[in-house]
Image (cartoon, rainbow, N blue to C red):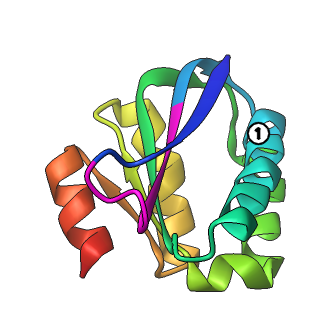
Amino acid sequence: MNIEFKYHSKYPETILVRKVTGKISAEDVLVSLKKMKNLLEEKPSVRCVLNDLLDCELDMNMETFMPVLIYVKNQDWLKNIKMAVVTKNPKTIVFPILAEKKESRIKAFSSYEAAENWLLK
């Protein structure tokens, strides 16, 4: 598992990119959300996160994913952040869609372009 953060090449003042590769667990997601919070506090102009899950495999089920949903729902700092999730894997897209149902500021996409367009609206 590897999670890298970088500011978007075209929109560095607006979008933070979180690229995930390899197998990732719910605990890895929680750890990376805490790191993301610190990065966003360092650069307050960034209000959008593009989550690149194109090269990862989510190693979780509904039971192990629930703490992630609860964390996201209970974090005030996340209420002002738009998060796009880019993936084409049917197994991977289920979890962002579940989060989307609970939180309208999270949305799943199959392309960077569509995700960027939504984030920048």
Relative to residue 85, is residue 43 drawn left or right? right
Q: Amino acid at mark 1?
A: Ala
Structural crowding at the residue carrying mark 1, measured as other residues with C-alpha within 10 Å and reported as few (<14), some (14–19) or many (≥20): many
Q: Position of residue 76 (x, y in %)?
A: 77, 85
Q: Nearer the viewer, residue 4 or 111?
A: 4
Between 70 and 29, the residue placed more toward the observer is 29
Task: Indicate yes or no whether the magenta region holds residue 13.
Answer: yes
Q: Residue at x 32, y 59 (%)?
A: 11
Does the image show residue 54?
yes
Depicted 60 relative to depicted 40: above or below? above
Left or right for 106, reference 65 = left
Asked whether 26 or 9 is in front, the reply is: 9
Picture coordinates of residue 1, whole percent (x, y):
67, 16
| Residue at 51% across, 75% down | 47
Image quadrant assignment for residue 69: bottom right
Residue 77 is drawn in which quadrant? bottom right
Quadrant that contains the C terminus: bottom left
Q: Label 1's element?
A: helix
What segment carries the magenta color?
10-19
Q: How many marks?
A: 1
Question: Is 85 situated above or below 48?
Answer: above
Give x and y (percent) for residue 56.
50, 22
Which residue does the numbered mark 1 point to in the structure image?
26
User: Residue 23: x, y in percent?
Assistant: 63, 17
Q: Is residue 45 left or right of residue 70?
A: left
For residue 20: magenta?
no
**Residue at 48% from the left image edge and 78% from the top image edge:** 105
Q: Using the rendered image of the protein, determine whether residue 63 is visible from the camera's viewpoint.
A: no
